[in-house]
Amino acid sequence: MAKHKPRAIPALEWVSAIIGFFIALALLGFLAVQAVREAEPLPPAIEAVPVSLHRAGGQYIVSVEVRNASPATGAGVQIQGILKQGGSEVEESTTTISYVPGNSHRRGGLIFTRDPRAYQLDLRVTGYELP
């Protein structure tokens, strides 16, 4: 019986194995960094800005864009709009945006009985919860 010599591994297989090893190592490193980064979650960074104004019957609807600049999600985001004149509050409207994912935006509306163009409109985010 003839003995078979072990086959030599071609250089291309070695190069492919080394590249695969480094890709796997980089992937594991990336996942480890993400796991550490997620250990201390950042709070949502939510702001509200007016987008447009529409009249509907006897009401005025201020369309509001709610932007979240953080990777954290905010749920039940509460938006308050106050119409002011000469420092005193004339009218208030609130709305709740149910879900604002991280690094995204959602739209909602605030409804007023007075025309917001005649007053100073103050918008602010008054609260949220973590899902």
Image (spheres, rainbow, N blue to C red):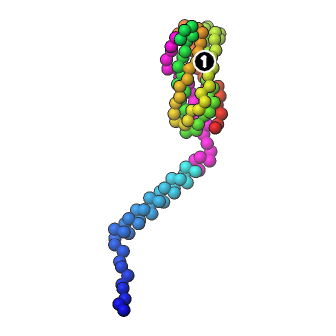
Q: Where is residue 20 in the image (x, y as percent from the top left)?
A: 42, 62
Image point (49%, 20%), residue name: 51
Looking at the image, residue 125 sits to the left or right of residue 26; the answer is right
How packed mark 1 is, by other alpha carbons closer than 10 Å (few <14, some 14-19, many 20 or more), is many
Q: Could you tell me if residue 35 is visible in this image?
A: yes
Q: Position of residue 72 (x, y in %)?
A: 58, 38
| Magenta extent | 36-55
Q: Residue 130 or 56: which is nearer the viewer?
A: 56
Q: Quadrant of the C terminus?
A: top right
Image point (62%, 45%), residue name: 40
Q: Quadrant of the N terminus?
A: bottom left
In the picture shown, does residue 116 fall above or below 66? above
In the picture shown, does residue 93 fall above or below 20? above
Q: Which amino acid does label 1 sit on?
A: Gly
Q: Position of residue 24 (x, y in %)?
A: 47, 59
Image point (41%, 65%), residue name: 18
Residue tagged 1:
81
Looking at the image, residue 69 sits to the left or right of residue 129; the answer is left
**Magenta segment includes 72:** no
Image point (47%, 57%), residue name: 26
**Magenta segment includes 45:** yes
* Tally of marks: 1
Element type at marker 1?
strand
**Image-quadrant location for residue 71:** top right
Q: Residue 109 or 27: which is nearer the viewer?
A: 109
